[in-house]
Amino acid sequence: MTQANDIPRVPLRDRIGSFLSERRALLRDYFSAVSGSAGRLIFSLIYFVALANTLSIADFGLFATASAAGVMLSRTLAFGFISALYRTATIRPRLIGSYTAGFLMLALLSLPVLVAASALTWLLFFSTTLPAGIFAIVIFAEALLWRPVEVAMIVNNGLGRFGRAATLAILTAAIKAAAAALFVFWPTPTLEAWAWFYVASNVVSLALAFGVFYPRQKLRLTPYLYWRRLSDSIYVASAEVLFYLQMEFDKLLVLAMGGPHLAGIYAIVMRLVDLTAIPIRTFSMMLVQRMMRAPQMLERLKVKIGIEAGILVVSTSALLFLAVVLHFYPNFLGRNVSEAAPLVGLALFVPALRNLVEYHAELLFARGQTLIRAGNLALLAALKAALLSSLLLQVADTQTLVWSLNGMFALLYLASAAVTYTALRRPAKAI
């Protein structure tokens, strides 16, 4: 019988080489995707600095809040059929042409819903601060121009073409940054003028996305394929609206209860928080794809804890680094941003907690538990609205408000984790 001591020992260097060789494709895909995040982060920072220091703080707050509303409302486009298109690209890429045609058809059918929801949002939150025409221009840019660009990125990621998706992300971020840089030299840098600059940059991005990066397949309407996915897509659309409602509703509440200037300060702080989250979203996207193919991968507690701990450490470190830079160089990102610079460090744990809530939503999507995902996001949106409203009514100074956000997002994280990990104990839905 062979003794344990007789088994040849493989050198550590060879074992590491074997490990990397077996996962070479995965590492290549990950670094391709991360390169897109890094490039997008750089150009997004240029865009932010140029715009935040050209518009007044109040106008920047109005634009950031209207843009956040546009991102939320854009999720009603095509009744969420983008989710079916993504699953198709990931699992059955030969049907992309059919599902793209279905997306275009449903996008047209969803326009009345988008218009009605936009009008209601303007009446509730913007009627006294932002002209309806400017609001409509921003919604048009976000929902009908930028959202289809995101579709092109989503489809390429679904196909595993992470390099192409990363390149498109970098180029479109560069186009927006160039528009903001040109706007710096515009003789009348008003919010209305910027709205048209924003439309122009998104038109260029849309032409690039579908002219160069979208996969070439013949468009074929195949209605019987769509109806099977439509109910699930509507769940996803509802969940996406609720997701961005709970992500962006704070900006709407701050505008409604605190006015445009406070909304501008708050938008600057949260934009810096968002920038630190860009690399984490790449990791979440690739993890979701892997889970769609292997739903059992999160059965081990060690894996669950390890992933969440990694998101916490990376997210917090990124904002801490930014806070230290702004502490010693408050004008590093410009004069207007310097007014919000002392507040950045007070929101230290907000990026991690927000990223973890977003990660929970992606887990439920990957498992096909779209109805539970929608319910969880509705719960979080209601809880966030109640907590933030209470803070705005009780807290007088901005520093205390920003510091209190850590506790608010901690409560949102605990609620999300309870719902998500309870749901994950159930069998995954067949995709």
Image (cartoon, rainbow, N blue to C red):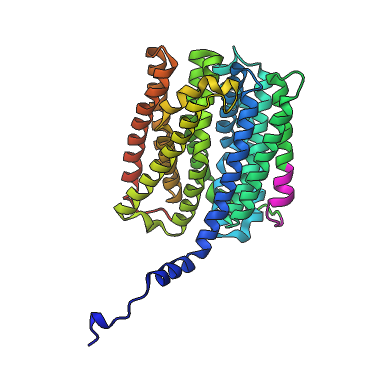
Using the rendered view, name the quadrant where residue 309 is placed. top left
Where residue 207 appears, as percent x and y from the top left, is 74, 43
Residue 121, picture quadrant? top right
Residue 103, visible in the rendered structure: no
Residue 419 visible, this angle: yes
Residue at 32% across, 80% down: 8
Q: Residue furthest right?
A: 187
Depth check, front residue: 398 or 158:
398
Residue 293, given in percent of the width and then of the height, sits at 46, 59
Magenta highlight on residue 210: yes
Q: Is residue 375 above or below residue 326?
A: below
Q: Where does the magenta region start and end? A: 207-218
The residue nearer to you, when weighing 395 against 159, is: 395
- Report the front residue among 370 and 320: 320
Give percent across and percent down for residue 172: 67, 41
Q: Which residue corresponds to the image point at 63% horizontal and 55% vertical from the top-left? A: 96
Q: How many marks?
A: 0
Magenta residue check for 169: no
